[in-house]
Amino acid sequence: AIMPNKFSLEQNYPNPFNPSTSIRYTVPSVTLSEVEGSRVSLKVYDVLGNEVAILVNEQKPAGTYEVKFDAAGLSSGIYFYTLATGSFVETKKMILLK
């Protein structure tokens, strides 16, 4: 298996979605601090920047992960999800269509 060498955040699928979607992200084998794995947070925000869900907030070993986001209690609209770890931050947009 090829070990990833950088963080990545993929577009959620399906998108638009109702009521749940999957988000894949990758944690590299060695980070800038030469540590195996990383502390990772994956959070969802509404258009006003309010945090509506914390999907991941823990130490993760290297690898590719897929997490489900269930938005059954949320209203239709645009949401943003952000992968943050150390100095890496990436945000993507997703659309909930009910």
Image (cartoon, grey):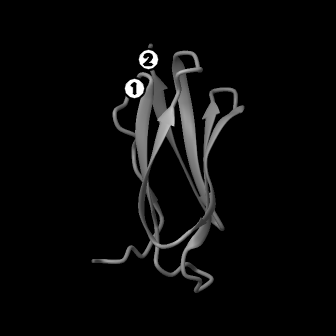
Q: Residue at x 57, y 16 (%)?
A: 75
Residue lying at 51% horizontally and 72% vertically, measured from the top left: 61
Neighbour tally class for label 2: few under 14, some 14-19, many 20 plus, Cα within 10 Å = few
Residue 86, placed above or below residue 93? below
Mark 1 nearby-residue class (10 Å; few <14, some 14–19, many ≥20): some
Q: Position of residue 92 (x, y in %)?
A: 49, 42
Viewer-proximal residue among 81 and 18: 18
Q: Quadrant of the N terminus?
A: bottom left
In the picture, which quadrant includes the C terminus? top left
| Residue 84: mark | none
User: Residue 17, which numbered label?
Assistant: 1
Please determine whether, in this image, residue 95 is positioned above or below residue 61. above
* Element type where label 2 sits in the image: loop
Disc 1 versus disc 2: distance between alpha carbons?
6 Å
Would you identify the image quadrant in which residue 55 lies?
top right
Q: Which amino acid lies under the numbered mark 1 shown in the image of this protein?
A: Phe
Q: Position of residue 60 (x, y in %)?
A: 55, 67
> Which residue is depicted at the point 37% across and 30% down?
15
Tag 2: amino acid:
Leu
Which residue was labeled with disc 2?
97
